Amino acid sequence: MPDDPSSPSGLSPGPVKGPRLRTVPPGEDRERLTCPDCGYIAYQNPLIVVGSVATWEDRILLCRRAIEPRKGYWTLPAGFMEERESTMEGAAREAWEEARAKIAIDSLLAVYDIPRISQVQLIFRARLLSPDVSAGPESQEVGLFRWEEIPWDDLAFPTVQWALREHRSRLGLQDFAPAVNPTPDVLAQWERML
């Protein structure tokens, strides 16, 4: 085989290997990326996002995003879980990474399904152990907001608004079922409240 001048090494890259064919494997009911040589199946599963509505007294921690998507908009401290960590460990890690916040998690506040981007979001209710917070590398700034100070028009994602509203509706409650995606009726009601 002749040398390939477009390759960094000048050599031909050779045949493509690994998962590269979309097909329905035996025993499956949907297409998967598979390797036609060895039969390996590369499963692509939804990502899990963990985060928190973390409070200090009557104020809620928000972070202004320094990264895309939605750079410059406000969000809760949240992000993708890492391997070998629990959901609560992940939420605490995200609070530290994004806002240098140390938190104590109280309970699971909400579970949101976002199939269009293949995410499941687990949002916890948490208490800040100190009001001393500062921007981490993924945040332009952080702040502690009273309810009436929340920048509703500048929230990064619908789930941020959902979690904030669910948090407020559960103030003072110790035992409750986690919230799920709001119905269209609930969304309409929330819009009228703004």
Image: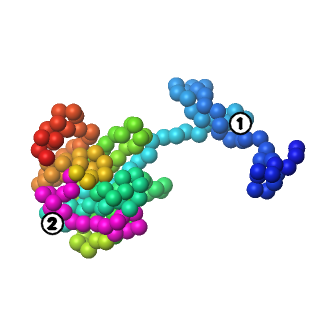
Colouring: rainbow
Nearer the viewer's eye, disc 2 or disc 1? 2
Residue placed furthest toward the front: 5
Q: Which mark is residue 38?
A: 1
Residue at x 85% of width, y 49% of height = 3
In the rendered image, the vertical position of residue 158 relative to residue 67, given as above or below:
above
Give how far apart the Cα atoms at labels 2 and 1 are: 58 Å
Note whether residue 83 is visible: yes
Magenta-drawn segment: 135-152
* Residue depicted at x 24% and y 66%: 143
The location of residue 98, given as percent across then percent down, is 36, 64
Question: Which is nearer the eye, 113 or 72?
Answer: 72
What kind of residue is marked 2?
Answer: Glu
Using the rendered view, name the quadrant where residue 73 is placed. bottom left
Give the mark, 2 or 1, whose residue is nearer the N terminus. 1
Picture layout, residue 96 above or below residue 181: below
Q: Let me know if residue 141 is in the magenta part.
A: yes
Q: Is residue 147 magenta?
A: yes
| Label 2: element kind | loop
Residue hosting label 2: 57
Left/right placement of residue 7 relative to residue 97 reads right
